C-alpha cells in the first residue's frame, strides 16, 4: 500500500530530501572523516586514542587551548564593554548623525579582519610608523604582538556583532516597564541597571557568542600577530600541512577539539537563555531620552571615536599601499610599484576571488533559501533536524571543514582536491547558516495564507514559491547575497588549506606575501580586497535607496 503525500507537502519534502543529501555529503561526511582521522593511526588503519594522548600530553598544545580560550574570553569582554554603552547611546540618546554612525560601524563586518591586523603591524609594529614617531620623542611603546594585539584587533573588528543586536534590543524594550519601575521610586540610573539591561541580556549574549566563536575560528589575525604564541586554528593548519602520514591524525584531534569547544559554548548559551524569561509582553517603543548638553557631547564623541578608531587600520592600508616598500621595510615615497608587482604577472588571483565569491554566493542562496522555507513552513521533527544540521557550519572553523574536505575528496569515488569546485563547495557550506537564518526571519513575516490562496487558485507549490514568496523575499535575498559575497571574498581560513597554484585568491596572495616579507604586495592585495568588498555594498545601498525613493 503506497502512502499518499498531500499535494502541499510534496515541495517541502523534496526540498528537505535534497537539503539532507547536500548537507550530508558536503558537511556531515567531511566532519565524520575529521573525527575518524583523530581516532585512527597515521596509516588510517587502527583505532586508537593515542593521538589525543599525544596532543593533549604536550604542554605546547595545552598552551594553545589556554591561549585560544583566554584571548576569546578577553575579546568577548572588551567588545561587550565598548558595545553596550555604544548601543544604548544610538538607541536612546540624541546622538547626531546616527545613520552615518550605524553604516560605518557595520563596515568592519565586511572587511577582512587580518587586513586590520596587518595594518596594526605597519602602524604599531617594531618598525611601525607610529612606533618610530613615538620613539623619536623618547616614548617607549609595548609590543603589539601576542595576546594584547590580537585582542585589540578582535575588539575593533568584531564589536558590531554585539553593537547591532543590542541596539535593536534597546529599541524594542517596552517603555511601560521602565515607567512602572520609576513610578515605584526607582531612579533612571537604577532602572537602567535593574530593568532595562536584564531585558537586553539575550541580545548581548547572542552578540558575545558570535564574537567568541569567531575568535576560536579565526586564522588570519593570530597568523599575523601571534608570533610564537600557539593558537588553535593556526596550529591545526600547521599540523595538517606538516603531516606526511596518509592520515592527518594530529590535525584531526585539534579539529575535533575546536568543534567541541564551539559546540559547548553554543549549548551553554542556549541553556542559559532557556532557563530565564526575558520577554516584556506588549511593546511600546521607548522615546529618545532628554539629556544635558554635556552628556550629549560625550555620547556623540564616544560613538564617533569607536567607529573611526576601528576604521583607521583600513584607511592606513589603502594609504600605505601607495608607498614604497623594500622587502618588509616601508619608505614614505609615493609609488605604484606595489600594484604593478601585484598584477604584472597575472590578474588571476583577483579574477578567482570574484568568481569564487559569485559562484558560492549563488550556491548559498540556492541552498539556504529553500531550506529556510522548509524550516519555517513545516512543523515536524524532520524540519527541526534539518534546521540543526543547516546551522552546524556555524560551529565549525573554516580550517577544520577544509581539512575534512581534503580527507574526504582527495581520492575515491569523488575527487575534488586541486580544482576550483572544492573551494566553492566549502564556501557554500560555511555560509549556508547565514542564508537560512536571514531567509527564515523574512518568511516568518509573510502570512502563510498568501500561499494557501495561491494554491487554492490552482497554482502548484513550486509556482507559488517562485511567483509569490520569492518576489516578497527579494530585498532580503539580495542583501544576504551581497553580504555573503563580501565575506567569501575575504575568506582565508579555508582557502589557505584548499588552494592550488592557479586557483590562488587575493587573500592567499596576501598570506604568501606576509610569509615571504613582501610588504608592498601584501598592502596592494589588501587595498584591492578592501575596494572589492566595498563596491557591492555601495551598489546595494544605491539600489535600496532608489527602491525606497520609488515607493
Image (cartoon, rainbow, N blue to C red):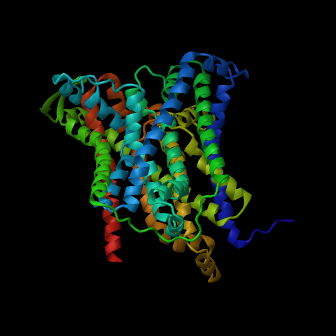
User: Which quadrant of the view contains residue 409?
Assistant: top right
Number of labels in the image equals 0
Front residue (pair 447, 460): 447
User: Which quadrant of the view contains residue 115?
Assistant: top left
Q: Is residue 149 above or below residue 284?
A: above
- Residue 476, percent across and down? 46, 63
Q: What residue do we see at 16% from left, 23% from top?
A: 136
Which quadrant would the C terminus be assigned to in this image? bottom left
- Residue 460, percent across and down? 62, 74
**One can see residue 413 in this view:** no
Residue furthest to the left in view is 333
- Is residue 497 left or right of 521 when viewed as pictured? right
Front residue (pair 111, 47): 111
Residue furthest to the front in view is 185
**One can see residue 465 in this view:** yes
Which quadrant would the N terminus be assigned to in this image? bottom right
- Residue 424, percent across and down? 48, 44
Front residue (pair 79, 384): 79
Q: What residue do we see at 66% from left, 36% from top?
A: 32
User: Which quadrant of the view contains residue 317?
Assistant: top left
Q: Is residue 156 above or below residue 541?
A: above
Residue furthest to the bottom in view is 457
- Residue 450, percent across and down? 58, 78
- Is residue 94 left or right of 176 when viewed as pictured? left
Front residue (pair 107, 432): 107
- Is residue 143 left or right of 416 when viewed as pictured? left
Amino acid at each position: 500500500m503506497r502512502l499518499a503525500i498531500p499535494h502541499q507537502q510534496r515541495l517541502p519534502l523534496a526540498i528537505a530530501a535534497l537539503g539532507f543529501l547536500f548537507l550530508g555529503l558536503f558537511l556531515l561526511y567531511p566532519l565524520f572523516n575529521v573525527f575518524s582521522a583523530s581516532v585512527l593511526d597515521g596509516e588510517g588503519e587502527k583505532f586508537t586514542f593515542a593521538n589525543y594522548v599525544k596532543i593533549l600530553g604536550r604542554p605546547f598544545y595545552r598552551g594553545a587551548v589556554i591561549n585560544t580560550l583566554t584571548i576569546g574570553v578577553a575579546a568577548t569582554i572588551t567588545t561587550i564593554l565598548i558595545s553596550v554603552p555604544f548601543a544604548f547611546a544610538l538607541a536612546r540618546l540624541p546622538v547626531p548623525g546616527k545613520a552615518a554612525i550605524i553604516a560605518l560601524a557595520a563596515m568592519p563586518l565586511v572587511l577582512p579582519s587580518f587586513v586590520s591586523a596587518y595594518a596594526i603591524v605597519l602602524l604599531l609594529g617594531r618598525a611601525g610608523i607610529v612606533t618610530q614617531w613615538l620613539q623619536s620623542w623618547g616614548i617607549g611603546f609595548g609590543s603589539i604582538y601576542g595576546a594584547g594585539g590580537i585582542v585589540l584587533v578582535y575588539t575593533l573588528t568584531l564589536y558590531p556583532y554585539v553593537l547591532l543586536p543590542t541596539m535593536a534590543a534597546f529599541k524594542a524594550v517596552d517603555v511601560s516597564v521602565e515607567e512602572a519601575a520609576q513610578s515605584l521610586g526607582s531612579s533612571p540610573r537604577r532602572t537602567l541597571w535593574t530593568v532595562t539591561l536584564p531585558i537586553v541580556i539575550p541580545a548581548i549574549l547572542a552578540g558575545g557568542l558570535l564574537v567568541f566563536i569567531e575568535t576560536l575560528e579565526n586564522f588570519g589575525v593570530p597568523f599575523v600577530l601571534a608570533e610564537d604564541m600557539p593558537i588553535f586554528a593556526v596550529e591545526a593548519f600547521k599540523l595538517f600541512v606538516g603531516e606526511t602520514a596518509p592520515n592527518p591524525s594530529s590535525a584531526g584531534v585539534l579539529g575535533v577539539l575546536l568543534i567541541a569547544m564551539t559546540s559547548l559554548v553554543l549549548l551553554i548559551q542556549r541553556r542559559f537563555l532557556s532557563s530565564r524569561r526575558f520577554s516584556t509582553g506588549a511593546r511600546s517603543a521607548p522615546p529618545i531620552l532628554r539629556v544635558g548638553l554635556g552628556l550629549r557631547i560625550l555620547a556623540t564623541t564616544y560613538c564617533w571615536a569607536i567607529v573611526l578608531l576601528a576604521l583607521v587600520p583600513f584607511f592606513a592600508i589603502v594609504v600605505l599601499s601607495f608607498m614604497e616598500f623594500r622587502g618588509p621595510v616601508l619608505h614614505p615615497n609615493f609609488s605604484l610599484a606595489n600594484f604593478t608587482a601585484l598584477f604584472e604577472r597575472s590578474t588571476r588571483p583577483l579574477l578567482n576571488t570574484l568568481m569564487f565569491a559569485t559562484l558560492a554566493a549563488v550556491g548559498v542562496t540556492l541552498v539556504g533559501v529553500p531550506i529556510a522555507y522548509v524550516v519555517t513552513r513545516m512543523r515536524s521533527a524532520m524540519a527541526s533536524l534539518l534546521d540543526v544540521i543547516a546551522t552546524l557550519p556555524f560551529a565549525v572553523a573554516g580550517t577544520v571543514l577544509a581539512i575534512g574536505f581534503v580527507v574526504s575528496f582527495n581520492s575515491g569515488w569523488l575527487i575534488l582536491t586541486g580544482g576550483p569546485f572544492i573551494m566553492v563547495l566549502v564556501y557554500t557550506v560555511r555560509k549556508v547558516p547565514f542564508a537560512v537564518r536571514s531567509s527564515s526571519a523574512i518568511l516568518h513575516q509573510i502570512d502563510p495564507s498568501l500561499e494557501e490562496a495561491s494554491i487554492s487558485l490552482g497554482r502548484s507549490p513550486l509556482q507559488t514559491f517562485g511567483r509569490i514568496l520569492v518576489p516578497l523575499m527579494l530585498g532580503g535575498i539580495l542583501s544576504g547575497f551581497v553580504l555573503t559575497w563580501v565575506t567569501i571574498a575575504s575568506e582565508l581560513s579555508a582557502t589557505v588549506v584548499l588552494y592550488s597554484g592557479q586557483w590562488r585568491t587575493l587573500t592567499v596572495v596576501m598570506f604568501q606575501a606576509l610569509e615571504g616579507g613582501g610588504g608592498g604586495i601584501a598592502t596592494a592585495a589588501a587595498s584591492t580586497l578592501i575596494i572589492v568588498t566595498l563596491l557591492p555594498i555601495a551598489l546595494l545601498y544605491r539600489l535600496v535607496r532608489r527602491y525606497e525613493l520609488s515607493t
